[in-house]
Image: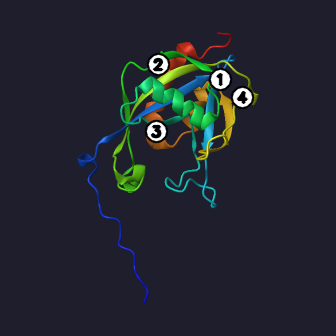
Amino acid sequence: MTRQSEPAKAVDPETLPYRPCVGIMLINRDGLVWVGNRMMADGGAHELTGAALTWQMPQGGIDEGEAPRDAALRELKEETGTDKARTIGETKDWLTYDLPPHLVGIALRGKYRGQKQKWFAMRFLGEDSDIDIAADAHQEFSEWAWVPLDELLGLVVPFKRSVYEQLVTEFRPLAVPGT
């Protein structure tokens, strides 16, 4: 007997909360920003979004009872393999993005409509050799790079672009060489 899988049930995003998260803009001594390329499905596109634009800065969820700054330091270590950084800035407000309709009820374990994020700017204090994206058992990135701030918007999935626009504006004074 062949079983047919049930089609995904339509989920009203208005009924779902935002997942509390943090993000890190890691800035090196040349004023460049760290980005990682999300792991890809075999077809060359991200398995959920189908997008070829899969670069992003480190980000992740806040654990129960965890302070946002502590979560940011943990996520930085998990996703980049380094903790050689110091916090130099923080977004004034929490930033939010909504998932596109075709991902609501699927992405983020189907529990959230998107994310609300507190972002931290951090100065990278190490050397490139200190970064190890394969250090964590749950590796998220296939490759990484340092990029100019103004290139960020062209690298991210469209539904995160408005958050990145706000970050570029707010953290631009911190992304300068030699500091």
What's under tag 2, amino acid-wise?
Glu
Q: CA distance from mark 2 to mark 1?
A: 15 Å
Check contact, mark 4 vs mark 2: CB within 8 A: no
- The numbered mark, 3 or 1, whose residue comes first in the sequence reads 1
- The C terminus: image quadrant: top right
**Quarter where residue 147 is shown:** top right
Tags 4 and 3 touching, CB below 8 Å: no
Q: CA distance from mark 3 to mark 1?
A: 20 Å
Which dot marks residue 154? Answer: none
Vertical side of 151 occupied by 53: above or below: below
The residue where tag 4 is placed is: 130
Q: Residue 124 falls in which quadrant of the image?
A: top right
Q: Residues within 10 Å of mark 3 (few under 14, many from 20)?
A: some
Q: Residue furthest front?
A: 65
Report which residue position mark 2 lands on: 170
Label 2 or label 3, whichever comes before in sequence order: 3
State the residue at coordinates (29%, 42%).
Answer: 17
Q: Where's residue 37, x and y in %?
A: 62, 42
The type of residue carrying mark 3 is Lys
